[in-house]
Image (cartoon, rainbow, N blue to C red):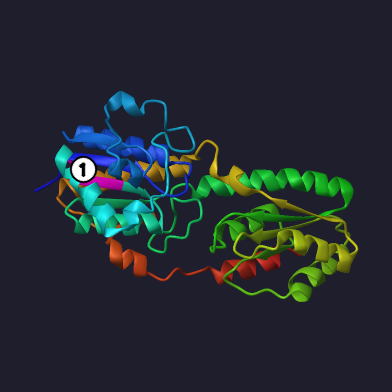
Amino acid sequence: MGAKSIAVLTSGGDAPGMNAAVRAVVRSAISAGMKVYGVKRGYNGLLNDDLIEMNLRSVSDIIQNGGTTLFTARSPEFNTPEGVQKAAANCKRRGIDGVVVIGGDGSFRGARDLTGAGVLCIGLPGTIDNDIACTDFTIGYDTALNTAMEMIDRLQDTSESHDRCSVVEVMGRHCGDIALQVGIATGAVATLVPEVPYDFDRDIVQKIEMVRATGKTHYIVVVAEGVGHTEELARKIEAVTGVESRATILGHVQRGGHPTVRDRVLAGRMGYRAVQLLEQGLGNRVVAVKGDTIVDYDITEALNMPRVFDEELLEISGKLSL
């Protein structure tokens, strides 16, 4: 029997497009004749019974906004068996049959636990890091890419004016996808990712010396968050090459801003599929995109999938940076 009353929450780090996903869930659910609640501050909202009933106008004019109007938070209490049971009891008391959880791996583990406690859960991958193995792209990733690219383009302007090397750290935790894509998009002379070890002399110094010999006088080095040591790296580059080098850590600016068309459409498609699954009485699923097709997987299967880094694209990046 399908769900008649559902809830939607955002959990973990915020990502542009989360609001678009919430909107898609709410409107798809109402179109299907369901009652739908918005949960404030992630799993904490389920524990504290901090829910509001949503209607069509509840999600008006949020599709273009970054962040999450439902707010997000981490919940140590929910990570305990007692916390899961408390959240499930609150859902059952309100007559909530299913919950759509928008977040990352940790959020999906919570969704699996809540499904085990009798509340059907569907996970939507919402994180700028693109570190969810079961999906080609996560909600928020494309916007973060474009934000980082724009920031590096601006840094490139000032680097060119001063014959500098800008060493730029981008987000992504232990995933180098943002760094790799942005490195190609901005013409970085070197891109460092946690998935592939680098050699300072071969991959940075020699590349700078090679392009300097062709007349280039300014350089961008993109560093993934999982590699780190960005300021130390900038000092080392300047000491070895003699090129004035500055470190810039872009930080949380990459989480904000208006979501791109791609993120808005992806969020809409994923939110719609989540409601379809709950209509069918299905839970413990993660919605994903493969190619241009929306698919879904068992949560445990999704969490166990190995993430594959595109080393060929890193090689292409190296060839294009000359």
Q: Which residue sits at x=47%, y=39%? A: 261
**Does 38 lie within the magenta span?**
no
Residue 234 occupies which quadrant of the picture? Answer: bottom right
Q: Is residue 97 magenta?
A: yes
108 lies left or right of 71 = left
Residue located 72% across and 51% down the image: 248
Q: Residue furthest right?
A: 242
User: Which stretch is magenta?
Assistant: 95-100
**Where residue 126 sits in the image (x, y, percent)?**
42, 49
- In the displayed structure, 189 sits above or below 273; it is below
Q: Secondary structure at mark 1?
A: helix
Residue 218 or residue 170, whichever sits in front: 170
Is residue 269 something that shows in the picture? no
Q: Position of residue 264 (x, y in %)?
A: 43, 40
The residue beneath circle 1 is 90
Quadrant in which the C terminus is drawn: bottom right
